[in-house]
Amino acid sequence: MEIERPRTDAATAAILIWQTGYRLALAVLAGSIAIGLRVLGSLQLSPVAELAIGTELADWLVPIATLMYVAMVLVIRAVVRRTRTADRTLSTLMVAADLSVVFLLVLLLARPEDYFFGLFIAFVSLQLTHVYFGRAPALLMLVATAVSFLLLNDIADRHGAMVSWGRVMVTLVVFGAGALLVTRVQSNLQERLDTLVSIFQKAEEGDFSESYDVAADERPDAITSVGRAYNRMRTQLASIVLTDPLSGCYNRRGFEQQFRRELARAARSHTDIALLAIDLDHFKLVNDTHGHLVGDRVIAEAGELLRANARADDVVARTGGEEFMILAPNTSQDGAQHLALRIVEAFRRRSFVEPTPRVSVTVSVGVVADAVPNDDIAEDLRARADEALYAAKRSGRNRVVLWSQGLDALKLRQTGETAISRRT
């Protein structure tokens, strides 16, 4: 499961920035110790380095390699800090710099029989690379490490050192097998972590449809525990994030998610979809007359009444202070009109906040229903429903207006009479 690329690059940038401090400190410390020991005569150059490069040049390569590494780390850090992002190229370049300086120092300071120390250091770096940068840079580093180790031994062999190629190959095979095994285990951990990250990213956007597949973890561990905890909390999180606490209906975020999902489904199945824009008439007067506590109770009961009159598949949402919307999938114009009439009539018969103060509230409803060619119709449907709602409010409220081309609106009056009004 692929994680959103910009977020991954931003995470890689953050990792590179904090790691550069440790790299600089380690490079300066190791370089200073090596140079100091060389000056004191306590550290000898490798005989292979003296023969292959020359004593004087090899002696200078220790500080030169340290300075070049420090300079590269500083450049990479400056680039990352400026752009606040880092793709795989920068992380791979950093890994290549680490590997180069390790094997250069091994060539300069270690005897051929001690070249395996380079593999040991590379193994540690390999695991850190996989943890922080992913499998691709780690596998690339594994191949580069094997090539570098063989190259070191070839240089030693060419300059008269006694190289046991059988021992070299056995060492390399053991290193490669161990590295691949650990990389495979870490890859499994990383893939499962990526799955969790993807689930959390969807949850951040209000999509709680996906759960973590606990059964797929053959050997449960801490990651499994996190996934299981998310699954337990998923319903509660969805309710908190997507539901309006006062009315009990979807909030705007939850409605948008359901709206997009139902539009995509209607586009695939070539079915109609209806949208009802609902406004409580003169709701400000309720607050001004009875107070906001009574107004809140009216909103709560209105949400309950709308859900009771909607069908099982309909989506009821509170999209504003006294504004609601109902999304009716697979519903024609006639079906939407019938639903709107039922809602208007239910509000006419209902007394809110009983037994006292028995508030009467009516609603105006704008209705639109249409076939769904694609997802792009979302804003157009919403605009048409709002236009029909405004027409209902302008024409006296407590009624339904059905949108049609040019707003040839069918107004269903309180008496149930039908009249056509043309907008000029």
Image (cartoon, rainbow, N blue to C red):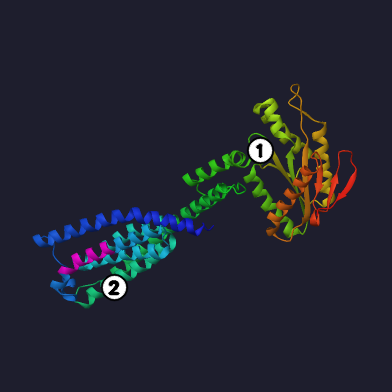
Asked if residue 317 lies left or right of residue 112, the reply is: right
Residue at point 31%, 65% (across, down) = 97
Residue 363 against residue 15 in the figure, above or below: above
Q: Nearer the viewer, mark 2 or mark 1?
A: 1
Residue 153 against residue 183 in the figure, above or below: below
Residue at point 29%, 54% (across, down) = 21
Residue 154: where, in percent of width, then height? 26, 75
| SS under mark 1 | loop
- In the picture, residue 62 is in which quadrant? bottom left
| SS under mark 2 | helix
Q: Which residue is mark 2?
A: 151
Magenta stretch bounds: 59-71
Residue 175: where, in percent of width, then height? 34, 62
Upstream in sequence: badge 2 or badge 1: 2
Total marks placed: 2
Q: Circle 2: is it few (<14), some (14-19), or many (20+) Cα within 10 Å?
A: few
Q: Nearer the viewer, residue 94 or 113?
A: 94
Q: Nearer the viewer, residue 162 or 264?
A: 264
Residue at point 33%, 71% (across, down) = 147
Q: Which residue is mark 1?
A: 321
Q: Circle 1: is it few (<14), some (14-19), or many (20+) Cα within 10 Å?
A: few
